[in-house]
Amino acid sequence: MSLQLIEAYVPDKHFEKVNEKLQEQPHTSYWVSSESEERMLIRILVDSDEVEEILNYLESVSNVVDGFETMLIPVRTYLSRETLNSESKEETTQEDADEEEKQILLRASRQELISFVERNSVTTLNYSLMIFFSAIVGSMGFIKDSDAVVIGSMVIAPLIGPVIATAFAAILGDYKLLGKAALTSFVGVAIVVVMAILFNFIFHMSGESSQYTSRTGVTGSDFFLALAAGGAGAIATLNRKAGNLVGVMVAVALLPPNVALGMSIGKGLWGEAYGSFLLVTVNIMCILLSAVIVFSLAGIRPVRWKEVQRANVSRSLSIVFVLIIVASLVGVIFLGEGVPLQ
């Protein structure tokens, strides 16, 4: 059983109502103490599956009550007489297993995911530098026609965060977060393309490089690769574990085609540049589509889904977002008739 601690600082005049409501929620342990003359502190230890519902209630209260604060703290270890009782532990494990079977996808709470995604939607100096260095390594991998060097560039390319965050923001209907994530993704793509153009002038790359020629057209396998990359990235995000292995998989679909696009532009090979551009478009759209589907299956919903106006806006944005992705893919298929679509 995974536990988390919720701390709620409640103004005295609202304490009785909030306290009564929280005690109705399933919990493992519950404490109340006086924080100050004006506020009470409620600590409630709950299973991770119950966190989101409680936070939703506290969030709704915080919107109308001044001086109301909430914190969520992960609990690594919890010991009590009940937890040390082996029979009770076996029963709890069985109950947890039954609950997990009812869920389509296991995930962290919506509030935790929003915080996680927001951190990956900002264009920071660290992000820009890592993209810069990965672009250099990737470009050298193309010039040397080296699989190992290209793979190394994928390992250090932090492209997974903002791309998956764009899909997450679309599901939430959060225009601000969507704009930040999309801008961060665009910055990453632009850095890679510009660096590839510059390196093309500095070093000579053979037009017969297998690393290059394999990324100048769209093949049927590219669709499946990008869809799998997007799904893996979304599931990793749901568990707040967008680590190196998943990041490499997303980078496979994003970094090399962008390097090929930059190299083609630098050489003035506009036909190859067109093919690389279509491949970049296919990969991004497929990753976004796959991530949107995974987030939908995981039950990700807007912050205030029950409020009609916000819910309608969120649903509309999600639908429009998916339609744009599908239309882009259909367009690529038709436009790619002059490019090798196998």
Image (cartoon, grey):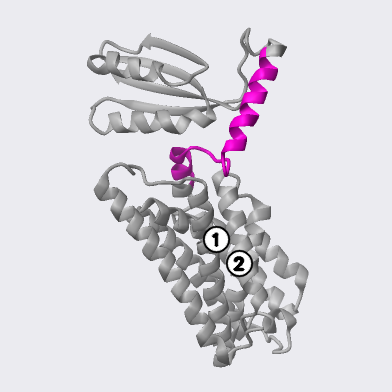
The residue wearing badge 2 is 226
The residue wearing badge 1 is 290
- Residue 34 falls in image quadrant: top left
Residue in front for this viewpoint, 110 or 86? 86
Residue at x-position 23% and y-position 27%: 66
Residue in front for this viewpoint, 119 or 20? 20
Q: Is residue 113 left or right of residue 218?
A: left
User: Of tags 2 and 1, which is closer to the observer?
Assistant: 1
> Which element type, helix, strand or loop, lies under badge 2?
helix
The stretch in magenta equals 88-116
Residue 265 visible to an observer of this rendering: no
Pointer 2 with pointer 1, Cβ within 8 A: yes
> Which element type, helix, strand or loop, lies under badge 1?
helix
Residue 223 is situated, as x and y percent measured from the top left of the image, at: 61, 71
Residue 316 visible to an observer of this rendering: yes
Residue at x-position 69% and y-position 10%: 85
Residue 84 is situated, as x and y percent measured from the top left of the image, at: 68, 11
- Residue 147 falls in image quadrant: bottom right
Residue type beneath disc 1:
Ser
Residue at x-position 46% and y-position 69%: 325
